[in-house]
Image (tube, grey):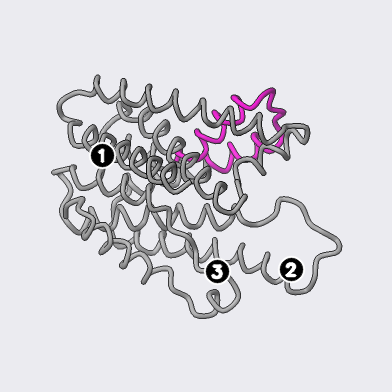
Amino acid sequence: MNTSITETHNIRGLLEEKIQHEYLEKYLQKPKIDEEKLSLLTALVDHKDSLDEIQKQRYIITTMLVQIALDTHELVPAQNNSNESKEEKLSKQLKVLAGDYYSGLYYFLLSEIEDIEFIHTLAAAIKEINEYKISLYYKELDNLEDFFEATKKLDAMLLLHVAEFIYDSSLNQLISDWLFTDRVIQEKIEAEKSGHFPLQKKWQAYDETSTNTFFINKVNALIRNNKTEISRSCSTLPEKYSFFKSYIHDRLQDTECNNSSMVEEG
């Protein structure tokens, strides 16, 4: 396995086969695969020489199935609406069942690997994510920076557990910084097209008085600062992580090219 675009597409195809379910797709949108997490995970797993090709493939697919299950459960509203229609109730119930279904798939695949340590790693990640979600739900966030930091930790937690299992904790900060930066960049691009900014909508649940201008200014500052910090962190990576340094460098260049294209189009 290598981290070429073609190979990543092959892994994506295998993943799509696993999550295909005719009944669920009849009532729900097909689950979204986080492309950046898939690419980053593939880069991490691919460069671990002690893993054979089958292990690499299963590690990637099972981890992404967990991510899809978590993302699907995240779509379920935290509060019930007494006025919701029968169709809305059905959709909510199916989202819960869909998340459970994807979780079941990952348990099945892991049982084939017979890798108890990796099973424990993913189980520990899921437990920590669920605990963190509960604490975050009830926690009063003092400011937008705290909200960004909490979201960043929660968003990257699964991949951090996997990266630490495969290597050590050396890449944790860089991984979480990059995943959150990429998420903010992609959501900002989408917001400029459609006006829909999921991260901003979540923040407004904490602070209804927050203005669009305030939020966008904070987002722009975060992107600039994070890019600088990510570049600095890459420069200090040990030689054994040169593959990851190259990956992040290429992705930073991609974001610059996309940003330039948007400016020209605008």
Residue pictured at 24% horizontal, 35% vertical: 244
Disc 1 marks a residue whose amino acid type is Asp
Give the distance between the C-alpha atoms of the residues marked 2 and 1, in whole angstroms. 44 Å
Determine crowd level at label 2: few under 14, some 14-19, many 20+ residues with C-alpha closer than 10 A. Answer: few
Disc 2 marks a residue whose amino acid type is Lys
Judge from the rendering whether residue 262 lies leftward or rightward of residue 245; answer left or right.
right
x, y percent for residue 149: 54, 28
Q: Earlier in the sequence, mark 2 or mark 3?
A: 3
Comparing labels 2 and 1, the label whose residue is closer to the camera:
1
State the residue in front, 166 or 95.
95
Give the distance between the C-alpha atoms of the residues marked 2 and 3, in whole angstroms. 15 Å
User: For the magenta stretch, what is the residue range?
Assistant: 128-157
Query: What residue did someone put label 3 on?
Result: 29
Determine crowd level at label 3: few under 14, some 14-19, many 20+ residues with C-alpha closer than 10 A. Answer: few
x, y percent for residue 159: 39, 42
Query: Which mark, residue 250?
Result: 1
Residue pictured at 31% horizontal, 20% vertical: 232
- Is 135 magenta? The answer is yes
Judge from the rendering whether residue 260 lies leftward or rightward of residue 236; answer left or right.
right
- Is 140 magenta? The answer is yes
State the residue in front, 215 or 201.
215
Residue pictured at 36% horizontal, 40% vertical: 255
Disc 3 marks a residue whose amino acid type is Gln
Residue pictured at 55% horizontal, 36% vertical: 151
